[in-house]
Image: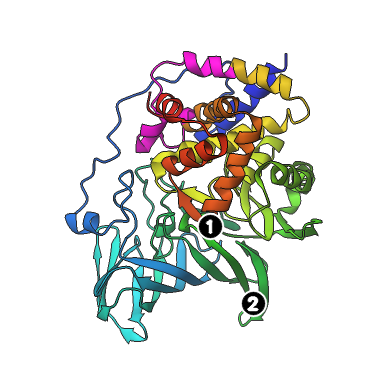
């Protein structure tokens, strides 16, 4: 029965959740899981200092992250890395921003660990202090509203390893060294601050230029296009990457390893570049063989692909994949067709339009799950509807699931956000009808592309496309 196909995909997704959080293999699931909710802290519970909460970006789900007093326009990250020197970073980061308030006198950055060697604001040395997980910079003179300024920070040292409120395992977020010959950056949701100073929340997107210097036997890849490669002294190579599209901090990535690089160009002018370890080349080629077809299929449903590059970098971490913008990182052991389409869907849901609050994770993972299921039924909508009806019934029979609109931090990456979220998407498609559903999604990307959107924004767009009042629908699916 074809229902088994869609349930198998659900099982794989659930496996990825567990593996990516714990990096431990567990037995395959044979039947639909029936998770039971356990008591968790409220999303708004915190013991953070008042000074940090006063300057947060204003996401009640993540009160410790970000600042609402300035807006970053550009990050220039110059970083020296060696996979053989585990957990060590030498870097210089330049942050170009403008003030959002009158007379900005302090700049609060999210940043954990490292020794700060030098810090200047517009070329003038500035004092700073570490307050919890914040780097608070005393600006040499107040910055007027809308005035541009630049902060240059040099630092080095060892990466601090600890869990976050959202991923309760060390070695699971930020810059990871899976072995002595490769490294990868995977920062969702709050791991960027573990490797560079930033305004670490999707509400403040910026343009990134990332320059990686590493021993010449390695290749280094990042977001966007490789615009320069330079051989320098001491058998080192500098790789310069630029991505001229707004990007959330958690989506910035770096991979370093003994890769082989493969390139192709789609008919629409999208540069696809894959970084693959030689020993897994055959399985990677098979997994990535439909990349162009997948992109064209998603474009037909969601509108134009939002960036000018795409690709994959394989990594030596079990059960791991992440939709880092324009360059997906994927475990050598999870090179599966459904994972490829899942992460590609995130280029629209999560990357081009990001979450206004981390508590709205269902839109990221629910849509990515849904289109990864739909891909396998793309030529038989009737069978897809029948099997989705069966999956929906399974979800409705699970007891004690958290409401999608009120997930706890520890349950951010969960059966609820992936599977229940995907079922919500299908229910919405049935509620508004085929034409309005896809018109609404395209309108959503046209209106909020390059920015963030809230659940309320999404509902408003779908109501506009369908000419329906969806209050009751979203109340039932998100809050009950």
State the image quarter where residue 212 is shown.
bottom right
Q: Distance between the residues labelled 1 and 2?
A: 39 Å
State the image quarter where residue 258 is shown.
bottom right
Q: Position of residue 434 (x, y in %)?
A: 65, 31
Residue linked to disc 1: 450
Q: Any magenta on residue 177?
A: no
Question: What is the residue that sits farthest to the right in this orientation?
Answer: 267
**Start and end of the magenta stretch?**
391-416
Q: Position of residue 280 (x, y in %)?
A: 74, 47
Decide if residue 365 is on the left or right side of residue 65. Answer: right
Decide if residue 49 is on the left or right side of residue 110. Answer: left
Question: Can see residue 15?
Answer: yes
Q: Nearer the viewer, mark 1 or mark 2?
A: 1
Q: Any magenta on residue 400?
A: yes
Residue linked to disc 2: 235
Q: Residue drawn 59% across and 42% down?
A: 441
Camera-side residue of 452 and 4: 452
Camera-side residue of 128 and 244: 244
Q: Is residue 312 above or below residue 271?
A: above
């Amino acid at each position: 029965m074809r229902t088994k196909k869609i349930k198998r995909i659900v099982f794989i997704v659930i496996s990825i959740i567990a593996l990516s959080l714990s990096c431990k293999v567990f037995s395959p699931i044979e039947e639909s899981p029936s998770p039971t909710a356990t008591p968790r802290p409220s999303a708004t519970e915190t013991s953070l200092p008042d000074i940090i909460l006063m300057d947060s970006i204003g996401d009640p789900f993540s009160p410790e992250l970000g600042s609402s007093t300035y807006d970053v326009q550009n990050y220039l990250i110059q970083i020296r890395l060696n996979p053989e020197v585990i957990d060590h970073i030498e870097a210089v980061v330049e942050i170009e921003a403008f003030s959002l308030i009158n007379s900005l006198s302090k700049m609060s950055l999210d940043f954990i660990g490292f020794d700060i060697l030098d810090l200047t604001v517009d070329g003038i040395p500035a004092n700073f202090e570490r307050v919890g997980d914040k780097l608070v910079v005393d600006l040499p003179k107040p910055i007027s509203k809308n005035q541009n300024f630049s902060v240059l920070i040099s630092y080095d040292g060892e990466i601090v390893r600890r869990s976050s409120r959202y991923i309760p395992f060390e070695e699971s977020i930020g810059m990871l060294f899976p072995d002595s010959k490769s490294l990868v950056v995977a920062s969702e949701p709050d791991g960027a601050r573990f490797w560079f100073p930033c305004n670490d929340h999707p509400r403040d997107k910026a343009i990134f230029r990332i320059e990686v210097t590493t021993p010449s036997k390695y290749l280094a890849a990042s977001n966007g296009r490789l615009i320069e490669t330079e051989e320098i002294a001491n058998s080192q190579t500098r790789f310069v990457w630029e991505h001229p599209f707004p990007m959330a901090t958690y989506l910035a990535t770096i991979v370093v390893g003994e890769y082989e690089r493969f390139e192709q160009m789609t008919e629409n002018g999208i540069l696809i570049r894959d970084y693959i370890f030689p020993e897994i080349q055959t399985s990677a080629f098979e997994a990535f063989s439909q990349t162009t077809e997948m992109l064209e299929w998603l474009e037909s449903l969601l509108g134009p692909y939002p960036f000018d590059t795409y690709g994959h970098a394989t990594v030596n971490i079990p059960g791991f994949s992440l939709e880092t913008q324009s360059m997906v990182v994927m475990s050598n052991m999870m090179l599966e067709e459904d994972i490829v389409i899942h992460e590609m869907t995130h280029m629209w849901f999560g990357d081009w339009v990001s979450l206004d609050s981390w508590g709205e994770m269902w839109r990221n993972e629910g849509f990515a799950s849904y289109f990864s299921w739909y891909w396998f039924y793309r030529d038989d909508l009737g069978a897809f509807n029948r099997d989705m009806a069966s999956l929906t019934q399974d979800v409705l029979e699970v007891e004690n699931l958290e409401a999608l609109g009120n997930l706890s931090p520890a349950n951010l990456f969960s059966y609820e956000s992936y599977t229940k979220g995907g079922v919500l998407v299908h229910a919405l498609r049935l509620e508004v009808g085929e034409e309005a559903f896809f018109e609404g999604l395209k309108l959503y990307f046209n209106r909020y592309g390059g920015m963030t959107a809230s659940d309320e924004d999404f509902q408003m767009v779908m109501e506009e496309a369908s000419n329906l009042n969806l209050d009751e629908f979203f109340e039932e699916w998100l809050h009950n």
